[in-house]
Image (cartoon, helix red, strand yellow):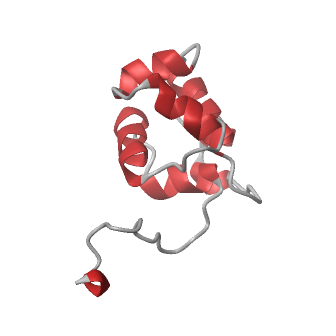
Amino acid sequence: MPSGHRQDLDPDFMDLGSYDSNHLLDSVLDQLHLPDDAALARAIDVDPALLADVREMRRDVDASLLIRLHEMTDISITGLRNILGDRRRRTRLDEGEGSEGNQ
């Protein structure tokens, strides 16, 4: 492993039993050496209120946020989902997003 990369951030070693958005955000903060969610929000160019909602579980971690976190950390989307505790093989589209069944 590269210097500074901790085993607990390696998605191949993750074994979380449940969905935990706080663990995901804390892991990313740790990896990027950022002090808080406000700094993370600036780094990934999102509104700090979005991260607050994710922390309070008022909002799910969506694909857009996962992509931004992937771009900053180089952790795969699958790895980020593992850290998050999301073990679904496929994700469902939110209601109203372009599924063929809604035509």
Q: Looking at this view, is 40 or 30 the one in front?
A: 40
Which image quadrant is residue 85 in? bottom right
Q: Classify the position of the C terminus by image quarter.
A: bottom left
In this view, which residue lies farthest toward the right?
Answer: 17
Number of disc labels:
0
Q: Is residue 95 visible?
A: yes
Q: Looking at this view, is 68 or 33 the one in front?
A: 68
Q: At which x and y percent is residue 32?
A: 50, 23
Residue drawn at (47%, 69%) of the image: 91
Q: Is residue 4 visible?
A: no
Q: Check the image and report above or below for 36 versus 103.
A: above
Residue drawn at (49%, 27%) of the image: 49
Residue drawn at (33%, 67%) of the image: 96
Q: Looking at this view, is 41 or 24 the one in front?
A: 41
Q: Check the image and report above or below for 23 versus 96.
A: above
| 66 horizontally vs 37: left or right | left
In this view, which residue lies farthest toward the left?
Answer: 103
Q: Check the image and report above or below for 21 versus 85.
A: above
Q: At which x and y percent is residue 33?
A: 54, 18
Q: Looking at this view, is 84 or 33 the one in front?
A: 84
| 35 horizontally vs 13: left or right | left
Q: Classify the position of the N terminus by image quarter.
A: top right
Residue drawn at (39%, 53%) of the image: 63
